Amino acid sequence: LCFRGRKVYEPPRYMSVNEAVSQLLDVVRNRDLQGEPPAYTDDTIAVGVARVGSANQQIVCSSMKELLSHDLGPPLHSLIIPGHLHFIEKDMLRIFASNPAILDES
């Protein structure tokens, strides 16, 4: 297969939570320049998870801006951007929050 005339393929690799957040925030900045209202911002709550179910799993809840600096280690990673949270969901996320006060602001 050849997509758009490209015959050189890069080796497969996993995207980290940091890369995903960085790309999503770039999209927001580009749309902001076009005058479109953002669906999320730097301060939007997000959850980064890595290697869920393994002995060395990591779960971090923080703002998207703070997730840029968290190192979740080797893959597999997932990024979760929750919608409106029930108070019980907020209580559970506080366990994994780098700054639990951020959940009080949402």
Image (tube, helix red, strand yellow):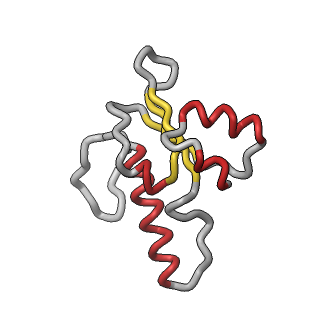
Number of numbered discs: 0
Q: Position of residue 77 (x, y in %)?
A: 44, 36
Q: Position of residue 67 (x, y in %)?
A: 43, 48
- On screen, residue 16 above or below 41: above
Residue found at the far top of this picture: 55
Q: Position of residue 30 (x, y in %)?
A: 45, 76
The answer to whether residue 43 is left or right of residue 18 is right
- On screen, residue 54 above or below 101: above
The answer to whether residue 77 is left or right of residue 82 is left
Residue found at the far left of this picture: 8
Q: Nearer the viewer, residue 48 or 78?
A: 48
- On screen, residue 73 above or below 23: above
| Residue 95: quadrant of the picture | top right
The answer to whether residue 36 is left or right of residue 84 is left
The answer to whether residue 98 is left or right of residue 15 is right
Q: Nearer the viewer, residue 11 or 41?
A: 41
- The residue at the point 62 percent across, 66 percent down is 39
Q: Position of residue 28 (x, y in %)?
A: 50, 70
Residue found at the far front of this picture: 101
- The residue at the point 35 percent across, 48 percent down is 69
- The residue at the point 50 percent across, 32 percent down is 59
- On screen, residue 78 above or below 8: above
What is the quadrant of the C terminus in the image? bottom right
- The residue at the point 71 percent across, 37 percent down is 89
Q: Nearer the viewer, residue 11 or 61?
A: 61
